[in-house]
Image (cartoon, rainbow, N blue to C red):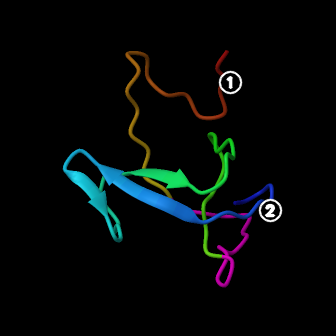
Amino acid sequence: MLPSGRESRVARIVTMDGDLERAVAGQSVTITLEDEIDVSRGDVLACTSSPPGVADQFETTIVWMADEPMLPAARTG
């Protein structure tokens, strides 16, 4: 897990229809780890043999769900 560097194994991949052997992009799943590790916002689960790269630039699509318009560089409370 990044950025903490903690390691664990996936114990279960859970869906509403039951457990899966594997999940693919786009599926809605719950991951249960073998160890009791607090995974929270900003953490990345990744394979230790091929961790994600680090970059200072990225491209994204943002879904803005607030009633107010998004203002670039504005801080929220």
Q: Is 32 situated above or below 48? A: above
Helix, strand or loop under label 1: loop
**Label 1 crowd (10 A; few <14 / some 14-19 / many >=20):** few
Q: Amino acid at mark 1?
A: Arg
Q: Is 3 situated above or below 42? A: below
Q: Quadrant of residue 49?
A: bottom right
Label tally: 2
The foreground one among 75 and 5 is 5
**Label 2 crowd (10 A; few <14 / some 14-19 / many >=20):** few
Q: Is 67 situated above or below 18? A: above
The image shows residue 11 at horizontal and vertical percentages of 51, 60
The foreground one among 44 and 31 is 31
Q: Amino acid at mark 2?
A: Gly
What residue is shown at x 77% (from left), y 57% (from top)?
3
Magenta stretch encompasses residue 66: no
What residue is shown at x 30% (from left), y 57% (from top)?
19
The foreground one among 51 and 70 is 51
The residue under label 2 is: 5
The residue under label 1 is: 75
Q: 54 left or right of 30?
A: right
Helix, strand or loop under label 2: loop
Q: 37 left or right of 65?
A: right
The image shows residue 55 at horizontal and vertical percentages of 72, 69
* Majority secondary structure in the magenta region: loop
Which quarter of the rendering shows the N terminus?
A: bottom right
Calculate the distance from the C-alpha at mark 2 to the C-alpha at mark 1.
Answer: 29 Å
Which quarter of the rendering shows the C terminus?
A: top right
User: What's drawn in magenta, residue-wise?
Assistant: 48-59
